[in-house]
Image (cartoon, rainbow, N blue to C red):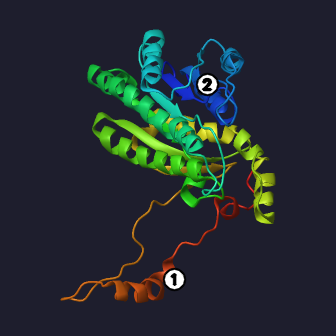
Amino acid sequence: MTGLLEGRAAIVTGGGRGIGRAIAEALAAQGANVIVADNGASIAGEDGDPKVVREAAEAIGKKALAFGESVASPGVAKQLVDLAVRQFGGIDIVVNNAAILRDAFVFRASPGDWDAVIRTNLSAAFYLINAASAVMRDQGKAGRGGKDGYDWGRIVNIVSSAGLYGNLGQAAYASAKAGLFGLTRVTAMDLARAQITANAVAPFAATRVTDIIQPANEAQKSYKERALKIGAHHVANLVTALCSPAGRNITGQLLGVRGREVFLFGQPRPVATLQAGAASDLTPADLAQDLSSKLGGQFTDLTTDLEAFNTEPLV
């Protein structure tokens, strides 16, 4: 039986472990050739281990190649795309999953840690999209993949509810993941005419990130216990569906997956307004009085993502 992605070429960053590995395995199971990109570093981005990516690629089998360098530089990102073109004849799918975590309260955070997290979690995704999308556009003009209705490309960015809700001590991580969704939206817009889709997926699953959560209260402790029950294969199933031929009309969307439940997130849009009178401006005095009294009922509270999703998952 032919898989949904037979003959397609995919890159999965952070593909050596956890969610990334599950995605790489799922894409290969549907017939895609996959480059598993992972430098084997710790969750803090340190002490790379080349065995991690080699073992992951070997476990997937002949559909997989290992790439053991960090993609957090434009040159390496281009090398990765060039490898896909040489080995598989093109590039159809990019999944930006690689991420590191260096948590600290904003008043204690190190600028160096901030830079490292932004570089790995956000800049690397841009570098890879930048290199791969140029090739995808050329492939579309040349007619790659048109016979089976696949169109030209799929980009999936793995974001986080921390970037949507916020979480204590995660200024760098949440900022990078929020930025990654912004990148997803603009990528979808820029590449729409080329029939290249771009979507974001916020996963809930047992991962190294989940494992090191230090709960600040009972609600967060309960969240961690529940999250550790959720398998990464649920995330992989959603990503694979977005990368399939049926995903051609889904772009610019933010989806979440939590066990056997998938949800579509709303995106920030105005929910209430203040308007000045016909011949006046909104003065500082007006705003000081009216912001809370007239808009306060619509303010967003400071619930963290760990508290917002603290319900029993469907596993």
Residue type pointed to by label 2: Asp
Q: Which of these two is toward me, 250 or 157?
A: 157
Relative side of 313 to 161, left or right? right
Q: Which of these two is toward me, 251 or 79?
A: 79
Q: Is residue 301 above or below residue 286?
A: above
Q: Which residue is drawn at 58% across and 41% down?
A: 238
Give the number of the disc on residue 297. 1
Residue marked by disc 2: 38
Dot 1 and dot 2 residues touching (CB under 8 Å)? no
Q: Where is residue 288 shown, x and y percent of the image? A: 41, 85
Marks 1 and 2, how far apart in space? 46 Å
Q: Where is residue 45 shown, x and y percent of the image? A: 64, 33
Tell me if mark 1 has few (under 14), some (14-19) or many (20+) residues whose alpha carbon lies within 10 angstroms of its own. few
Task: Report which quarter residue 274 is drawn in.
Answer: bottom left
Task: Report which quarter residue 17 is drawn in.
Answer: top right
Camera sees residue 152? no
Q: Which of these two is toward me, 110 or 264?
A: 110
Q: Which of these two is toward me, 242 or 68?
A: 68
Q: In this view, does 264 lie above or below 296?
A: above
Q: In this view, does 193 lie above or below 138?
A: below
Element type at mark 2: loop
Q: Residue at x 62, y 50 (%)?
A: 109
Q: Closer to the N terminus: mark 1 or mark 2?
A: 2
Residue type pointed to by label 1: Gly
Camera sees residue 59? yes
Relative side of 21 to 70, left or right? right
Q: Which residue is drawn at 38% across and 31% down?
A: 130
Q: Where is residue 178 shown, x and y percent of the image? A: 50, 51
Q: Where is residue 241 shown, x and y percent of the image? A: 54, 38
Q: Which residue is drawn at 43% across and 44% down?
A: 184
Task: Report which quarter residue 273 is drawn in.
Answer: bottom left
